[in-house]
Image: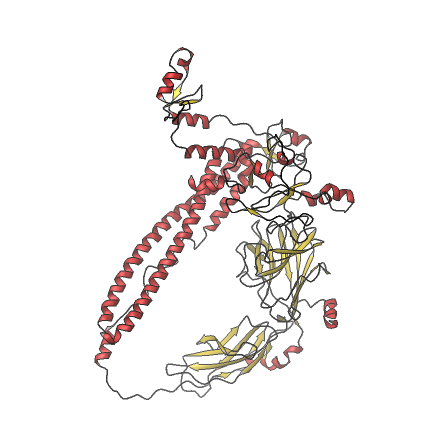
Amino acid sequence: MEEMEEELKCPVCGSFYREPIILPCSHNLCQACARNILVQTPESESPQSRRASGSGVSDYDYLDLDKMSLYSEADSGYGSYGGFASAPTTPCQKSPNGVRVFPPAMPPPATHLSPALAPVPRNSCITCPQCHRSLILDDRGLRGFPKNRVLEGVIDRYQQSKAAALKCQLCEKAPKEATVMCEQCDVFYCDPCRLRCHPPRGPLAKHRLVPPAQGRVSRRLSPRKVSTCTDHELENHSMYCVQCKMPVCYQCLEEGKHSSHEVKALGAMWKLHKSQLSQALNGLSDRAKEAKEFLVQLRNMVQQIQENSVEFEACLVAQCDALIDALNRRKAQLLARVNKEHEHKLKVVRDQISHCTVKLRQTTGLMEYCLEVIKENDPSGFLQISDALIRRVHLTEDQWGKGTLTPRMTTDFDLSLDNSPLLQSIHQLDFVQVKASSPVPAIPILQLEECCTHNNSATLSWKQPPLSTVPAEGYILELDDGNGGQFREVYVGKETMCTVDGLHFNSTYNARVKAFNKTGVSQYSKTLVLQTSEGCNFETQSAPYSQLVDIKKLLAVAWFAFDPGSAHSDIIFSNDNLTVTCSSYDDRVVLGKTGFSKGVHYWELTIDRYDNHPDPAFGVARMDVMKDMMLGKDDKAWAMYVDNNRSWFMHNNSHTNRTEGGIAKGATIGVLLDLNRKTLTFFINDEQQGPIAFENVEGLFFPAVSLNRNVQVTLHTGLPVPDFYSSRASIA
């Protein structure tokens, strides 16, 4: 139960929830805390004033709870709270549990009303401190949010279970431990107070006295208040709206916004969701059991590593002492190596124990919370949070994926010291006749007719001279850095052909090869000059070496597909890896197969499916970009994310240049990466979207997209740079 405590605390005040309300994003807040973080928006920015001014923006823009900020051109709502554009900036504060909270714009007016009944200023906006989603309150204010009665019940039971032994409620000074409870009076008594205040005679003789623990259970099982509709306060919830995923009353179905929605019986949906949550918990429970067994295994490994280390060190010391004074220094070096290996193994295993313990504690806390929620008898309250809990349970189970419960380190030391040959060599040490060495291999010959370049890759082939009689055991292929720098090894092995990927575009490389055997290494072959493409592929097949001299005269355009190897596991590929979507509601990143470091490159993506107005992002990224968040949230990506009405540019979680104009099914997004001018520009339906998005971009970039299950896009490559941009670039 203790591990569940964080689930029961408000992210603003850090204390147990008091009168919790459920925000549209499924997170909870104390009603008083929700009032404390309200922000009053300027009158000119309210939805009513916008409609009155005839700006043409639909009401949906302000009712869509999945959209973030509607007011700041520099903030889409995903970043930290920096204030609205037209309001003075107020510094962020931190709640006791570390969540950043935006304080109220002005002190709340003095009032004698409770927080729930006190009037809310007009045009008030509330931002969830956990997911940072913002929305404007309607005329009902905070009363428009449903109360989380299930969470209240769980907190009550948790606090009761944490309390010490039940005390007498009638002792005047130091309360004694209660011995009985009267079910009719609902009072706990110690023996002296029971005899004095509740004698077993007269009308009190018919009262039923039970043990304190049984009385506590009776209190807990007492009927709870029936949940009422937030729109019609006199009506109880009677049905469940499948489309809105919330309980509704009879009046909502007759005249409210749910009149045309599909509805089902409240009890049936309550049982269905309880069953789904129970099934999800079964899988998570198995994972938790495996994790506990895994922790036992890891702790045993620590002991075994310690024992093996002591035994190995003792053996090593005995062997090194036999080599007398001449080997004392070497002995110290060997001991240092063993200790280093020992510490490394312990560090790896202890780190894994710590990581697994934290994850198990979080999993156990979530399980206990879910089990307490399942005990609730309030269908409407349960259904208000069941969907979010089911998603969290599945997500937590996925985190215990393959490889998580596998030791990262073995207990054995892969070191062995055999001193007998060395001792024998010392005893037999003497002058001997030096034998004549065998010859080294002949110089390899590069086969020019089979060498070629393709995209930013180079394939080289070589062979031994026809009359060579000395066999080669292997070959070493070396390339320079494309700028005339030092050579470096790119291949060592027995094969006589090698393809090198990941080279810079529009660069000249020098290649050479040499052979080796047990005797030594041959001299280098003649140096071969290779020229990579200006773009990322050719409209023709790979050019043989005889054509490499005229490679710059070819028309180079970008041909590539998405890369399943580096993509997030939730990404779904089709159409030869040119079409992608996602199985998750969260944003996932997928990269193109080819990176760019020089030249001008242009590609397009068409929107095949666009449901529920999500925010897909398009742009470029480094290879090590985070794959489990929106593109542009870290410093490894440069992107434009867009919804059905507007777009923003984002890099390192900084949102800039909000531009009107969005996307729909069938729209085309163009991405233009000009590494000659070091700029990145975006287009929507052949029109430039905003100014140049990013400047001073340098390095190796991969085409990138982030999307969720509501979006499907298809990649189009092999496209030339738009004519208007080419003419503008030539003028510049």
Colour scheme in use: secondary structure
Locate residue 185, reporting x and y percent.
44, 19
Residue 163, picture quadrant: top left
User: Residue pushed farthest top?
Assistant: 202
Res 577 visible:
no
Task: Indicate left or right for 217 with 86 as reference.
Answer: left
- Numbered circles on residues, count: 0
Asked whether residue 293 is in view, the answer is yes
Q: Residue at x 73, y 71 (%)?
A: 732
Q: Position of residue 455 (x, y in %)?
A: 59, 71
Q: Quadrant of the N terminus?
A: top left
Nearer to us in this view, 102 or 389: 102
**Residue 404 location in percent, x, y?**
43, 53
Q: Nearer the viewer, residue 310 or 237?
A: 310
As displayed, is residue 490 above or below residue 42? below
Position of 608 with respect to 405 (left or right) is right
Residue depicted at 72% across the width and 53% down the height = 661
The image shows residue 67, relative to residue 109, as above or below, that is below
In the rendered image, the vertical position of residue 584 relative to residue 172, given as above or below: below
Decide which of 608, 589 is in the foreground and name it. Answer: 589
Image-based side of 206 in relation to 36, left or right? left
Q: Position of residue 528 (x, y in %)?
A: 54, 82
